[in-house]
Image: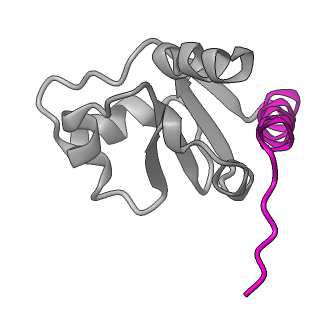
Amino acid sequence: MFSASLNKKVRALGLKMALSSKALGGQLIVVDNLDLKDGKTKELKAKLGGLNLGKSALVIDGDALNVGFARASSNLGNVDLLPAVGANVYDIMRCETLVLTKAAVERLEARFNG
């Protein structure tokens, strides 16, 4: 069985290019945090309604996912949630809008710098 694997530098470059593509296209949104008061889907819809997410959105959080946000977003078919460790080119390019938390930005910067 043959499997082609890419080294870390090439994978990091691909991730940088995917993030840059979203940023240049105006499809990247950075938020402070994902805190919800009740963790209800209705509250999340209201919060995300003003962001103009389009058909699909990928939300990337820091190391640990916000439990209330994860619970509320599980009922929305057009919103996916990933921790910063799981960020990958395929999921970023597949979604129409990318939403990053400040913790995710810091984690991704650390990932690129070392």
Tell me the magenta residue range. 1-26
Residue 6 at x, y percent in the picture: 81, 53
Q: Is residue 81 above or below residue 13?
A: below
Residue that protrudes farthest toward the left in the picture: 38
- In the image, is 70 to the left or to the right of 15? left
Q: Nearer the viewer, residue 38 or 83?
A: 83
Magenta span: predominant SS is helix
Looking at the rendered image, the quarter that the C terminus falls into is top right
Quarter holding residue 68: top left
Q: Nearer the viewer, residue 54 or 34?
A: 34
Q: Residue at x 59, y 42 (%)?
A: 87
Q: Residue at x 59, y 18 (%)?
A: 105
Q: Residue at x 46, y 52 (%)?
A: 80
Q: Is residue 29 above or below residue 59?
A: above
Q: Is residue 21 magenta?
A: yes
Q: Nearer the viewer, residue 33 or 114?
A: 114
Quarter holding residue 1: bottom right
Residue that protrudes farthest toward the bottom in the picture: 1
- In the image, is 31 to the left or to the right of 73? right
Q: Is residue 95 magenta?
A: no
